[in-house]
Image (tube, rainbow, N blue to C red):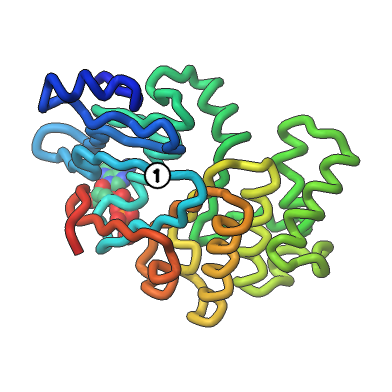
């Protein structure tokens, strides 16, 4: 499929079926984004012809019932999964044109991911979990220490950094996971049900951290959630049903 930058809007004016131009300032845009799992009778269209533009510093909630396509959409936007048709433009570059190693580089440096189940490594301390992405990326020890320390401070975990995950509460573990996702300095943080395993009070504290990361640090935060308190704190909410956005 073809993608149009804002400067090419003229192409759209002459062809009403052309995809809408992509705003020059968008951090992520999708046009005609579609994902079908399986084939024949078994085919499931998890994401259907999605068009969206996400602007820098947005705190965006994608809501919808179980099975509506939220996780699939996040995975496509993050380049973790390949669309069946359509495409994603990330920071001005079409992901379908990326090689596998370029995708790995992009995911390592430009994107952070936070999951419902935290995903920390049990044998590593909070600090070691956070510095791991820098270790993998070959960052030197002194810089690793500084950046991991800053990321842990940012999520309010300046102390307790020597503790292992099982010695931390669920909320603290999710803070460690957020610090780990931010330590490489990504432009976008994806959070898939980040409060799903937390009580409501702890969930609000995690939602507040995510909001502040977007508001104060300009990181774009995209979350898929069932949590109405979290969705209510977002700057924009899009609801999905059967793989597409619906009016609320
Ligand atoms: N790898 C897969 N293979 C086959 N079908 C899949 C796969 N992943 C997702 N699906 C299907 O795609 C649809 C959308 O799933 P998805 O996980 O994106 O929904 P969701 O809104 O995130 O759900 P939940 O809120 O329960 O996490 C569902 O019908 C699901 O069964």
The answer to which image quadrant residue 209 occupies is bottom right
Which is nearer the eye, 121 or 153?
A: 153
Which is nearer the eye, 221 or 115?
A: 221
The N terminus sits in image quarter: top left
Dot 1 crowding, Cα within 10 Å, few <14, some 14–19, many 20+: many
Across and down, in percent, residue 11 comes to 21, 18
Residue beneath the point at 30% across and 23% down: 4
Q: Is mark 1 within 8 Å of ligand 1?
A: no
Across and down, in percent, residue 231 comes to 39, 67
Residue beneath the point at 73% across and 54% down: 151
The C terminus sits in image quarter: bottom left
Q: How many marks?
A: 1
Q: Is residue 47 left or right of residue 202?
A: left
Residue beneath the point at 41% across and 55% down: 60
Q: In this view, does 197 lie above or below 66?
A: below
Residue denoted by label 1: 54
Q: In this view, does 202 lie to the left or right of 1?
A: right
The answer to which image quadrant residue 20 occupies is top left
Across and down, in percent, residue 29 comes to 36, 36
Across and down, in percent, residue 85 comes to 24, 27
Q: In this view, does 117 lie above or below 69?
A: below
Q: In this view, does 203 lie to the left or right of 166?
A: left
Q: Is residue 148 left or right of residue 197?
A: right
């Amino acid at each position: 499929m073809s993608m149009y930058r804002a400067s090419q809007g003229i192409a759209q004016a002459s062809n009403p079926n052309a995809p809408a131009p992509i705003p020059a300032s968008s951090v992520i845009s999708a046009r005609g984004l579609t994902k079908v799992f399986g084939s024949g009778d078994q085919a499931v269209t998890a994401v259907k012809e999605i068009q969206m533009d996400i602007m820098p510093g947005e705190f965006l909630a994608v809501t919808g019932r179980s099975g509506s396509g939220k996780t699939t959409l996040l995975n496509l936007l993050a380049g973790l999964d390949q669309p069946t048709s359509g495409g994603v433009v990330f920071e001005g570059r079409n992901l379908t044109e990326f090689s596998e190693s370029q995708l790995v580089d992009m995911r390592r440096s430009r994107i952070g991911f936070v999951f419902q189940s935290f995903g920390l490594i049990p044998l590593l301390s909070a600090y070691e979990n956070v510095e791991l992405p820098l270790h993998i990326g070959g960052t030197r020890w002194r810089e690793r220490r500084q950046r991991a320390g800053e990321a842990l401070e940012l999520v309010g975990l300046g102390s307790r950094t020597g503790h292992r995950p099982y010695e931390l509460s669920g909320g603290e573990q999710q803070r460690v996971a957020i610090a780990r996702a931010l330590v490489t300095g990504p432009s976008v943080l994806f959070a898939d049900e980040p409060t799903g395993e937390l009580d409501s009070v702890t969930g609000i504290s995690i939602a507040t951290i995510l909001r502040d990361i977007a508001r104060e640090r300009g990181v774009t935060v995209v979350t898929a959630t069932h949590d109405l308190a979290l969705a209510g704190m977002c700057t924009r909410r899009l609801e999905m049903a059967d793989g597409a956005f619906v009016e609320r």
